[in-house]
Amino acid sequence: MNLIFVGPPGAGKGTQAKLICSEFGIPHISTGDMLRAAIRQGSELGIKAKEYIDAGHLVPDEVVIGLVKERLSEKDCNTGFLLDGFPRTVAQAEELGRITDIDYVINVDVPDEKLVSRIAGRRSCNKCSAIYHVSTYNKMTCEDCGGDIIQRPDDSEETVRNRLNVYHEKTKPLIDYYRERKLLSAVDGDKSIQEIFDDICSVLT
C-alpha cells in the first residue's frame, strides 16, 4: 500500500501518519527526516542537499527526487510506504509517478480559521518545551518546571496565515492533480485523533 498524506500545516498529518504506519506495518517517510539523514550520512545526494541548505536555498527537485528514489528502493518499502511532505508540486508528483505507483492520497482537511486558532493559540515552555493551548491553560509559568510560557514566533497569527496562503497556492494544483486521477480522498481533520484515524482506515480498507 503506497500512500501520500497532504494537508495544511497544523492539520495533524504527523500524528495520523505514525498511527497508520503502525497499523499497516509500513515506513513513514518524511522528506525532512530523509534530508537530515542523508546529510548526516554524508551520501552524495546528502552533500549536494547540504550545499543548498547552507547557502539558504531550497533543495532543488532533482536532489529531493533522487533521495526519495533511493529511500523507496530500500527493503522496508517492499510492502508499501507513507510519504509525508512529498510531493509538494505537480512536477514532483509527475516524477514520483515515474518511480512508483501510488494507491491512495489522503488529504487531511481542516478549515483555515480552525488552524489559525489551533496554532496561534499554542504556547510552549522556554525551559522544558512543554506545549500548552490558551483555551485550556492561561498561566504565565509552566506547571511542570516553572519556566516561562511563550509563543514561538512561527506560531503568531500573521505567520500562520502566511504559511496557509503559501500552502494553498502551492498545493491546490497538487490536490487537483490527484483528484483528476481518482486517487484523492479527503478526511475531516477537525475531529478527535481516533475519529480521524478511523476515517482514514475506512478509506484504506
Image (tube, rainbow, N blue to C red):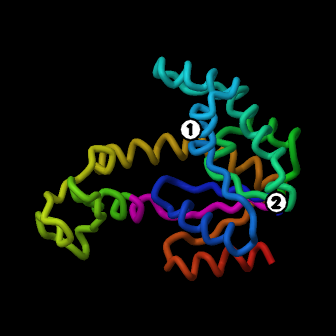
Q: Quadrant of residue 18?
A: bottom right
192 w.r.t. 110: above or below? below
Q: Secondary structure at mark 2?
A: loop
Give the total number of marks visible in the rendering.
2
Q: Looking at the image, which is closer to me, 47 or 189?
A: 47
In the image: residue 172, left or right of residue 181: left
Residue 173 point in image, percent of width and height? 67, 43
What is the spatial separation of the Cα atoms under label 2 and label 1, in whole angstroms?
A: 22 Å
Please say whether residue 47 is one of the residues in the magenta stretch.
Answer: no
User: Is tag 2's residue or tag 1's residue first in the polypeptide sequence?
Assistant: 1
135 w.r.t. 141: above or below? below
102 w.r.t. 88: above or below? below
Q: Looking at the image, which is closer to me, 2 or 135?
A: 2
Q: Looking at the image, which is closer to me, 66 or 58?
A: 66
Chain part drawn in magenta: 104-115
Q: Name the image quarter holding the N terminus.
A: bottom right
Residue 164 point in image, percent of width and height? 46, 48
Q: Which amino acid type is shown beneath numbered disc 2? A: Gly
Residue that numbered label 2 is attached to:
80
Task: Write the residue at 56% across / 38% down.
Answer: 36
Residue that numbered label 1 is attached to:
36
Q: Which amino acid type is shown beneath numbered disc 1? A: Arg
Q: Secondary structure at mark 1?
A: helix
Q: Quadrant of residue 186?
A: bottom right
- The local crowd at label 1, few if under 14, some if 14 to 19, many if 20 or more residues have their Cα within 10 Å, is some
Please say whether residue 112 is one of the residues in the magenta stretch.
Answer: yes
